[in-house]
Image (tube, helix red, strand yellow):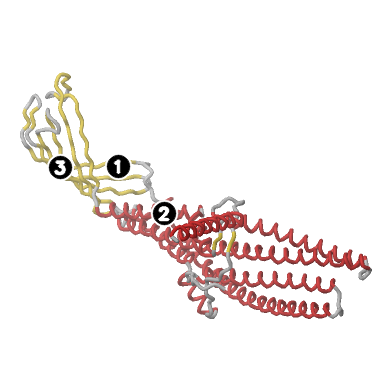
Amino acid sequence: MKKLCGNILFIGLCLLWLLATVALCGQQEGGGSILGLRECVDLAIKNDPDIINTMDQVHIGRLTEKQAKKDLFLPTVSLETSYGPKLDFFGRPIATENIYSSRASVEKPLYQGGGLINAYRLGREVMKRARLDLVGKQAEVTEKTAGAYYDLLSAQENVRYYRELSGQAAETVALLKEKYAMGAALRVDVLEAESRRSRADYRLLTAKNELAEARAVLNRYLGRDPGSNVRVVEEFPIPPINEDVKTLTASALDERPDLLYQKEDVAYNQLKVALSKSKRYPHLSLVGSYSWEGDQFPGEDKEWALMLKLSFSLFDSTLSSSVSRDRLLENNFNFVRNPETYDNKSLSLKLFDGSSSEVGLERARADYRLSRNRLAEAKRAVVNQVQKAVNQVKEAEAFLETARKWLEYSKEKLKLLEERLQLRETTDLEVLDARTKLADAKVRYLKALYARAADMVRLYRATGKRLQWKETAK
């Protein structure tokens, strides 16, 4: 009994392994990946080169914001050291005696005409713009991927319908040839049936070419090789939008990522103008330094200094002034220097040093005007795009209803003709013609159905609404 049970278990495991192998082979022969709409959108967003670059820009924006924050709050710290000969009383080098000279200094801008805070705000705007640009590109990729997805889905169904029609046409030709051989049909009927079979084969060939083209387009969006054998499953995971045009337009003006990007671009260029203007104001900095000198690194003898630096740029020239309090501590070279505190004042003028902000300011003002004009144009375009998207959805729904009624009519007519054929009140050619019209009606209905779904995705993008995926299929 135990041996019998063991044999049965072994046979069952072998059958299970065989079924799994057959299923795997069937899936491989059936055509590679099988994807839904959301999977296609996720892959397209992941592999789109513009989105990858925009994500890099987001990272760069984050680093820019961090750097701007450091520049606002942290001072500049400099460290330096040198090793060279000592100097005698007259300042001449002593070749046989060397000395270390080290220095640490800290400089913190105190006033730059608003340049510090505006530079920090500019860094934050870089981050905001990059994020909004990313959201806008994701919406763009979602729209074109959804359109390619539904085009491929329609092409798949078209091939299936026209393959069935081609088979039915071949059966009709064979049947009429048999009747012709028996003298129950005319040769002209056989020739007409062959002509219609040729037209069905031509439609099947056209549908296959459209399928290959639609698959190549979707593969390109997904970042795959155009020849990859990808198939899609029918699903409608995006709920419809039932709000009126006025509400949708107001929502778009508040939520469209590309419009929000234009608003941030205006703020960004406004800060650029303010930053350029700040170069016209005096710049004031506080500098503190500490120095060491001696035979051993970093040095035994010390010296400190505290200085205020003031600079002002005007007419492509820079006037600078500084006031410092220095403290020299005891230091032995080959002579003795006593500790001493002293004040140091300096004044310098650099002519034609390229410090004028006039060109930069005018360029910033021109960019600011351009960004404002683009924002106004973008608002007008959004109003038109929302209206157009709403109209397209309405037209798609009307066309879908027309296609649905024509499909019902074609089904009923074929059913009626098949019944009349049984009563010999019609011909096989009329039935074949009805089947052809039914296949065309199915294709037209599916195209209308998928076009409405693609137009709904387009409406989401036009209104700036985020896609709300649902799990229920058709």
Look at the image and tell me in which quarter the N terminus lies.
bottom left
Decide: few, some or many residues near mark 1? Use Cα within 10 Å; few <14, some 14-19, many ≥20: some
SS at badge 2? helix
Residue 379: in sight, yes or no? yes
Marks 2 and 3 close (CB-CB < 8 Å)? no
Cα gap from disc 2 to disc 3, whole angstroms: 36 Å
Q: Single out the residue that lies furthest toward the front.
A: 1
Look at the image and tell me in which quarter the C terminus lies.
bottom right
Q: In this rendered view, identify the residue nearer to me: 187 or 203.
A: 187
Q: In this rendered view, identify the residue nearer to me: 376 or 430.
A: 430
SS at badge 1? strand
Q: In this rendered view, identify the residue nearer to me: 140 or 223.
A: 223
- Residue 103 spot, x, y in % from top left: 18, 37
Residue 29 image-quadrant placement? bottom right
Q: In this rendered view, identify the residue nearer to me: 49 or 119.
A: 49
Q: What residue do we see at 17% from left, 45% from top? A: 288
| Left or right, residue 299 beside residue 355 | left
> Disc 2 or 3, which lies upstream in sequence?
3
SS at badge 3? strand
Cα gap from disc 3 to disc 1, whole angstroms: 23 Å
Q: What's under tag 2, amino acid-wise? A: Leu
- Residue 454 spot, x, y in % from top left: 59, 68
- Residue 259 spot, x, y in % from top left: 48, 66
Residue 221: in sight, yes or no? no
Numbered mark located on residue 361 in the image: 2
Q: Which residue is mark 1?
A: 349
Q: Which residue is mark 3?
A: 305
Cα gap from disc 1 to disc 2, whole angstroms: 23 Å
Residue 430 image-quadrant placement? bottom right
Q: What's under tag 1, amino acid-wise? A: Leu
Decide: few, some or many residues near mark 3? Use Cα within 10 Å; few <14, some 14-19, many ≥20: some
